[in-house]
């Protein structure tokens, strides 16, 4: 996996397109003779790009896939749970690799009951994206308020 960083090169729209080019839905993007696609299949929450740096930066990681959830005994329930585990386990492994205890790091999971189906990783409908964006904004805002209150103490 490659992390695009603006200190190494000038980032363009192509870099953004490459980081979101989900195979099967969007075409891969070629930059300087090298072809890229969305790395989310192997690392859905790209934390190493933030966690491998020193410093005092606060990191708020927002994930769409819960690691813990009750299993619904249906085909859709089992497939949805497998999808959650596949993506959430990636995040858990990455978080375990880094010393996040001494950093201002929080991992939040946007656990939307309307997204409790097997195909949510591939649901890019306008309705779903708008709902997830709003839920993500609300969850992030609430957590940032907690951080501000903690800082005021």
Image (spheres, rainbow, N blue to C red):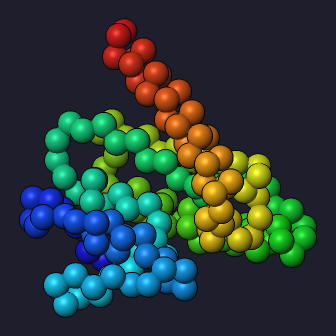
For residue 143, above or below residue 28: above
Identify which residue, 78 or 124, lies in the foreground: 124
For residue 11, above or below residue 53: below
Q: Residue furthest right?
A: 74
Residue at screen point 19% across, 90% down: 33
Residue at screen point 16% across, 84% down: 32
Q: Residue 57: which quarter of the image?
A: top left
Q: Number of numbered discs present?
A: 0
Identify which residue, 57 or 7, lies in the foreground: 7
Identify which residue, 136 or 69, lies in the foreground: 136
In this rendering, position of residue 128 left or right of residue 10:
right
Residue at screen point 10% across, 67% down: 9
In this rendering, position of residue 71 left or right of residue 58:
right
Q: Residue furthest bottom?
A: 33
The answer to whether residue 38 of the structure is visible from this angle is yes
Residue at screen point 90% across, 70% down: 74
- Percent x, y of residue 133: 56, 46
> The C terminus is located in which quarter?
top left
The answer to whether residue 97 of the structure is visible from this angle is no
In this rendering, position of residue 103 left or right of residue 142:
left
Q: Which residue lies furthest to the left in this view?
A: 8
In this rendering, position of residue 103 left or right of residue 136:
left
Q: Residue 76: which quarter of the image?
A: bottom right
- Percent x, y of residue 111: 66, 48
- Percent x, y of residue 134: 59, 40
- Percent x, y of residue 73: 90, 67
> The N terminus is located in which quarter?
bottom left
């Amino acid at each position: 996996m490659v992390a695009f960083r603006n200190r190494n090169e000038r980032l363009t729209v192509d870099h953004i397109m490459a980081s979101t080019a989900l195979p099967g839905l969007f075409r891969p993007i070629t930059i300087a003779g090298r072809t890229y696609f969305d790395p989310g299949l192997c690392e859905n929450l790209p934390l190493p790009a933030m966690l491998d740096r020193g410093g005092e930066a606060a990191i708020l990681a927002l994930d769409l896939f819960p690691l813990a959830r009750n299993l619904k005994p249906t085909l859709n329930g089992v497939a949805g749970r497998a999808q959650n585990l596949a993506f959430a386990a990636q995040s858990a492994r990455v978080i375990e690799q880094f010393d996040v205890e001494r950093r201002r790091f929080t991992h939040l999971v946007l656990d939307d009951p309307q997204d409790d189906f097997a195909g949510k990783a591939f649901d890019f409908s306008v309705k779903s994206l708008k709902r997830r964006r709003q839920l993500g904004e609300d969850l992030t805002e609430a957590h940032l308020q907690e951080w501000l209150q903690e800082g005021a103490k």
